[in-house]
Amino acid sequence: MTGDLSAVVTTSEPYRLSFALGGLLATEAMVAAPLYLDLHNWAAVRKALNADNLLHARTRSTAVRLTRELIQRMSVLSDAEIAYLVTAPGPERLHLMWAAMCRHYVFVAEFAQEVVRDHYLLGVSRLVPADFERFWDSKALWHAELEKISPSTHTKLRTNLFLALRQSGMLADDATIISPLLSPEVLALLDARTPSDRRFFPVGGCL
């Protein structure tokens, strides 16, 4: 662990563990964001997405799951963040969607801080599946819900979390951790929260 322990998110509440599909959902977010800016109502956005299969899911059940997951994540973004998401360059959209994933999923937030960021700060250059397994086992001591997860779901969660990291540009195909170049605009949005949400990224500096 690093010295900035005050910035680490911890909780004894059960983890949400439904991040098993879609990676960052950044492409889907670009469909939902303009709808929200027009409707300013997530229930209405959800209805519109499902009614016309705007996310182009192959089945109705997949569309419902994907829409639910997308709305849950985007609902933790501020209106200013969603407005910026619509016009931001590609990498910045990915960074905001990673922040949204971390905000909604405490498990992901803790992994981002306690494993990914700590690896970076300690000079550990690679992130491998074994890091996820050690993290999972350590959290299972305090979160009984992790012990109830089936092996197949466990694998899906690990796979999708690593996919999200690769999509965000923070994990290379050879498992090297990459420190992102966060734009001033994204940093301002991250720093608007206390503590700063830059703690979800493998970057240095004070939080």
Image (spheres, helix red, strand yellow):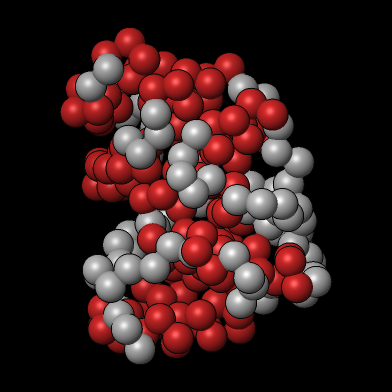
Query: Is 184 situated above or below 159?
Result: above
Q: Residue at 68% across / 57% down in the picture?
A: 202
Q: Residue at 25% across / 70% down in the picture?
A: 14
| Picture quarter with the N terminus | bottom right
Query: Is 99 situated above or below 173?
Result: above
Q: Can residue 160 be seen in this view?
A: no
Q: On the image, which quarter does residue 147 sit in?
A: bottom left
- Closer to the camera in the image, 81 or 71: 81
The percent position of residue 15, horizontal first and vertical second, equals 30, 67
The percent position of residue 149, horizontal first and vertical second, equals 30, 79
Query: Is 64 situated above or below 189?
Result: below
- Closer to the camera in the image, 68 or 186: 186
Q: Is residue 38 left or right of residue 24?
A: left
Q: Is residue 6 visible?
A: yes
Q: Residue at 39% across / 68% down in the picture?
A: 10
Q: On the image, which quarter does residue 171 sit in?
A: bottom right
* Residue found at the far top of this picture: 38
Q: Residue at 47% across / 59% down in the picture?
A: 109
The percent position of residue 9, horizontal first and vertical second, equals 43, 63
The percent position of residue 24, horizontal first and vertical second, equals 51, 46
How many marks can you see?
Answer: 0
Query: Is 12 situated above or below 69?
Result: below
Q: On the image, which quarter does residue 58 sit in?
A: top left
